[in-house]
Amino acid sequence: MKSAIITCAPTGAIHTPSMSPHLPVTPEQIAHAALEAASAGAAIVHLHVRDPHDGHPVQDVGLFRELLSLIRASSDVVVNLTTGGSPHMTVEERIRPAIELAPELASLNMGSMNFGLYPMLDRFKDFEHDWERVHLANKDLVFKNTFADIERILRTCTDQGTRFEFECYDTSHLYNLAHFLDRGLVKAPLFVQTVFGLLGGIGADPEDLMHMRRTADRLFGDQWEWSVLGAGSSQIRTATVSLALGGNARVGLEDSLWDGPGSLATSSRVQVARVRIVTEALHREVATASEARTRLDLRGLG
């Protein structure tokens, strides 16, 4: 069985600073969290940035450049920049950092979807910044990723040598990816991040995982690498199913603030360490950054 590629997403755009004191906000904090995750076994770090003053998600190229400099000074970990940004951003805002910084890997959402964060208000009541409650409460939010949007990102970023982590929140997104593969706009090996447990996408039951895997196997054969992202309390459970079946896993505070029922994770490193324990208990090796680059056909640091 192949070694397991562990991805870590240390901050993201879903959660707010008031929801956890451990969520990194500044470039220095995010870089520290990413480097800790890499030292614990993450081969890839998936990066967002935030306004250093109030923590709201931004796509500021200067902040990304500072973050990348801090990481590159200490690690060869694979850096994966978001083109998803936040559902509240325009496509132009979301893709600017990837266009200007030309990472070896970038995320790409493979379809539009309803996006519901408002159930989090049942658990979290007190917020330090005005934007946080507004961000979570929106019940009229569509995360826009049209065929034209996807094609624009593919053509622009592929030309500069960037490859993609294809984020698929439902089976329709897998079929969208197959459409672009058939058209020759994406090339194997496909790094497919199947996302479970976000309201608006597929659920996080083991049957949902298996349905996504069966569909991708039928569409892509041996041309893809499977990774699993479980939101909230499903993070380690869904990662374990993927790892047991020979797949890969993504963890981090972007996807879940938790390290067990009612216990906030003190860092993304803790979550990486936990999923590494699962990996090794299954008698699998943890992939290095170099191994991940080879399997995903990334251009490397050169």
Image (tube, rainbow, N blue to C red):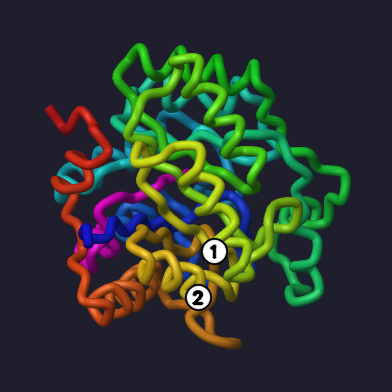
Q: Distance between the residues labelled 1 and 2?
A: 8 Å
Query: In this view of the protein, can residue 82 be seen by the observer?
Result: no
Question: Where in the figure is residue 162, as x and y percent of width and height?
Answer: 34, 25
Amino acid residing under circle 2? Arg
In the rendered view, tell whether residue 187 sits above or below residue 255: above
Residue 276: quarter of image = bottom left
Amino acid residing under circle 1? Gly
Q: Read off the residue under disc 1.
A: 230
Left or right, residue 252 beside residue 135: left
Return the residue nearer the eye: 64 or 156. Answer: 156
For the point 20% across and 57% down, which residue is it?
A: 287
Return the residue nearer the eye: 19 or 276. Answer: 276
Q: Earlier in the sequence, mark 1 or mark 2?
A: 1
For the point 52% across and 42% down, which residue is it?
A: 167
For the point 87% across and 51% down, which residue is it?
A: 139
Question: Where in the figure is residue 263, as x and y percent of width and height?
Answer: 54, 86
> Dot 2 lies on which element?
helix
Density class for disc 2 (Cα within 10 Å; few <14, some 14-19, many ≥20) is: some
In the rendered view, tell whether residue 263 sits above or below residue 46: below
Question: Where in the figure is residue 143, as x and y percent of width and height?
Answer: 71, 38
Return the residue nearer the eye: 64 or 172. Answer: 172
Q: Give the range drawn in magenta.
A: 35-49
Task: Please tell me whether residue 37 belongs to the stretch shown in magenta.
Answer: yes
